[in-house]
Image (cartoon, grey):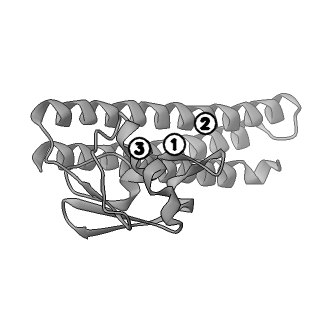
Amino acid sequence: MQLGDVVDSANTKLANAVTHFKEELNKLRTGRAHPSMLEGVMVEAYGTPMPLIQLATISTPEPQLIQVSPFDPGNIEVITSAIRSNQTLGLNPIDDGRVIRVPVPPLTEERRKEISKQVGIKLEECMISMRNIRHESLSFIDKSKKDKTIGEDEAKRLSQQVDQAMSSAKSDAESVAKSKESEILNL
């Protein structure tokens, strides 16, 4: 890594961490049906575990219903059992031989609080990732300073830029988490 690229690299990695965090939050249930709710479902098909998205089309024809249309009708039973056995979803799919309908029941207050805690856990995972990125960048700057490839002032300026990028990414992640939490608790 070049010294001039340290801040750009940190910015890119921090932005990727926030993007990943947003994608993880999209997988959480909010009481409204969303195709991404089934993204993490793995199905044992053709002798190997496969993501559901590779075996079927997922759509939401109604706000409280997810519809799964398998590419191969022979996989309907294994897809249905994979969705049913996924305890984090808590969904009960119904198949009619062609498509699988997954009604999304309204969340109970207890379940809302449980999902809200998951937002906090995912936020902490994101923060750990961002702190590691910051630490990696600052270590590179410190090493360059010790090797005398940059001066004290340059190292301080680069460190401040990394810290600014970190605080910006942190506030982005916190605002996303706060809005998701309010969405979960107030639906």
- For this rendering, which residue is in front, 10 or 107? 107
If you read the primary sequence from the N terminus, does the residue marked by circle 1 or circle 2 appear first? 2
> Along the horizontal axis of the image, is 169 left or right of 32?
right
* Label 3–label 2 contact, CB within 8 A: no
Residue 138 vertical placement versus 11 (above, below): above
Q: Nearer the viewer, mark 1 or mark 3?
A: 3
How far across and down, in percent of the image, does residue 115 sit?
Answer: 27, 36
Contact check, label 1 and label 2, Cβ < 8 Å: yes
Residue lying at 64% horizontally and 52% vertically, measured from the top left:
46
- Residue 106 — which label? none
The residue that mark 2 highlights is 134
Amino acid residing under circle 3: Ser
The image shows residue 12 at horizontal and vertical percentages of 62, 54
User: What residue sits right under mark 1 in the picture?
Assistant: 166
Question: In terms of image quadrants, where is residue 98?
Answer: bottom left
Determine crowd level at label 2: few under 14, some 14-19, many 20+ residues with C-alpha closer than 10 A: many
* 1 and 3 marks in contact (CB < 8 Å): no
| Position of residue 8 measured from the top left corner of the image (x, y, whole percent) | 66, 55
- Residue 168 visible in the shown view: no
Circle 3 sits on which residue?
81
Q: Secondary structure at mark 1?
A: helix
Mark 3 crowd level (few <14, some 14–19, many ≥20, 10 Å Cα): some
**Position of 74 compared to 69: left or right?**
right
Badge 1: residue crowd in 10 Å (few <14, some 14–19, many ≥20): many
